[in-house]
Every structure is written in C-alpha cells, then in structure tokens.
Amino acid sequence: MISVPPEWISKEGLKPHNELYIVTNDGCLYIYVPYDVDNINIDVTNLDTSIIKYLILSYYMQGASEIHITSQKPLGAETKRLVKETIKKLRNADITDMGLNYIILRFKDETPYISIKDFLNEIENMFRFINNAVSDLVLAVINSDKMVVEEVIERIDDFDKNYRYIIRIVSKMAQFPQYNVFPSPRELIAYAALAKDLARSVYHLSKVANFYLHGANINGDALMATKRLYDELYKFYKLHNLETVATIKHTYEYIKRLLQVPNNKAEYELRRLAAYSIAIMDDILNIYCVPPKKKKAVTENIHAE
C-alpha cells in the first residue's frame, strides 16, 4: 500500500479506482497520472507564413502526435506549399487531410517505446554521418572536386531530419517517464547536449562547403587536420580511451594556429567546425565520466530500555 498526499489527489481530480503509473528510476519511485500527448490546434489566420514552418518543427520536436492548422479564410497556395516542404524535413510525418481552410498533420514514431539500443544506434549514426561528411568534404576540396562537395551539402537534409527525430525522442522521454530508457535524467541532458553539438558541427560543415563552392580558398593543412580531428573524436566516442583527449586538444590547437587570422569566411567556418569538436568531446566526457554511487549505510537508533 502506498499513501499519497490528499492535496495532490485533489489537484489532479483523482477518484477511487483511477489508474496511476509507478516507475522506478535510479533508486527513486515515481507515481504519476498517465498523461498522453494532446492534439495541437494552430489558427494561422493572422500569422506570417514564415512562422508556420517553425511552429510545425517545434511541436514535432516536442512530441506532438497531430497538428491541426486552421484559418478563418482559405489557406493560400504558398502556405500549403510551405507545409508540404516542411513535412518532407521530418521523419514519419504525413498530411492526413487537407481542405480549403485546414490541414491536418500526423506524426507517428517508429515504435511506441524506443529501446536504449535503438536510441544509441541513432546517436552513433549521427557520429558516423559527420565523420564521413568531414572526410569526404576535405578530400573533395583538396582534389578540387566540386561535385562531391555539392553531394555532401545534399546529405545534410537527411542529417537534420534524423537530428529532429532524436530531439523528439529525448523530449518524450523527459515528459513521460514510461519512455525514459536511462537510469536517471542526467543521461537525457547529456545526450541532448551531444546531439545539439553534433548538429551545430554539421551546420558549420555546410557553411564551409557552400563558401568553397562560391570560390573561397581553404588552407590544406587545416583541412587535413580537421579530418584527423573528427576521426579521433569518433574513435573516442567508440572506445572511451582518455589518451585520445590529449590528441584531440593538440590537433585543435594546431588548427587554431593555422587559422588564427582566417583569409575568408570558409576558413572562419572551418575554425568553428574544429571548435565544436571540443564541445562534443566534453559532451562525451559528461556521459561517461560519472562517479559511481553507493548506498548510504543504514543506521538504527537503539534506545536503552
């Protein structure tokens, strides 16, 4: 039997025989009311068209299942085009219905509950993506192969799609204990930071590629050092070898010296790409370098008769 505070029962409007969920996590016992994600209604009558895209992306990443876009007047062709283009940037997203003044979007996750194995596979796919993209971009620039540079840029849409899905899963795990596959909330925070820093790295990677295509020259030594940097970073994520930390930091300092005064915007973005390797390295350390816990000894008060 578990007693719960009457104030909480009153606040939640609970009645006899209402169902509650109990979840154990990291030595704690959580009792909570089983909430579900409600549908989102957005009236876009007086909204600027550009805002609609960001509302869809934000609600998707925060775990929405359905979005109903409505207007008090007919939705224009530009708005409908924007919604269709935005949906293409999201995993498992569909337009299920559309009328003169409404659009219904539905988001369905691949599985109701993601496993820790599936989640870590998603994170590793992000690592592999950026590692391969940096390597391919560097070699393409060294060899003046603009076709490969263009192909690397095209890949980034797929990365962004997977990144938004990861943030969606992290958000659902934070909001609903039954989704959380980690021993404590600490891991959620650490992996969310890691995913965001990986995404920022890809952003600067795309900037390097675009500025190169517009005619910028890039220091070849700095390019090759950046490739080595991300190779070492991926190795560190996989093997957790702390000796790799020194190699990553030394390589980054070398790139900083080479690009201390960037010649153009491409070299500035390359320096930013290199800098994010340190942020990602810190994220990895925050995931794995955690002091072990031990239970406190139980003491008993013995009173003399």
Image (spheres, rainbow, N blue to C red):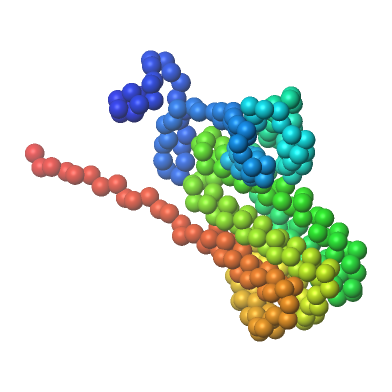
Image quarter where the C terminus lies is: top left
Q: Nearer the viewer, residue 83 or 15?
A: 83
The answer to whether residue 189 is left or right of residue 131 is left
Q: Quadrant of residue 245?
A: bottom right
Above-or-below relation of 103 to 207: above
At a point 90% along the width and 69% down the height, the residue shown is 145
Disc tally is: 0
Give the residue furthest to the top.
Answer: 16
Q: Quadrant of residue 9?
A: top left
State left or right for residue 206 relative to residue 54.
Answer: right
**Residue 211, image x, y percentages:** 78, 69
What percent of the width, then of the height, locates residue 200?
65, 60
Which residue is more in the foreground, 106 or 41?
41
Residue 12: quarter of image: top left
Q: Quadrant of the N terminus?
A: top left
| Image: 227 above or below 292 | below
The residue drawn where x is 71% and y is 51% is: 160
Instruction: Please state which of residues 141 and 50 is positioned toward the viewer in this rendering.
Output: 50
Residue 191 % position (x, y): 58, 53
> Looking at the image, can residue 135 be seen?
no
The x, y position of residue 66, in whole percent, is 64, 30
In this picture, residue 57 sits left or right of residue 19: right
Task: Please tell me which residue is depicted at 74% across the width and 34% down the height of the picture.
Answer: 76
Q: Is residue 302 above or below residue 2?
A: below
The reply to whether residue 275 is in sight is: yes
- The answer to whether 228 appears left or right of 168 in the picture is right
Residue sitting at x 39%, y 20%: 14
Q: Is residue 228 above or below residue 257?
A: above
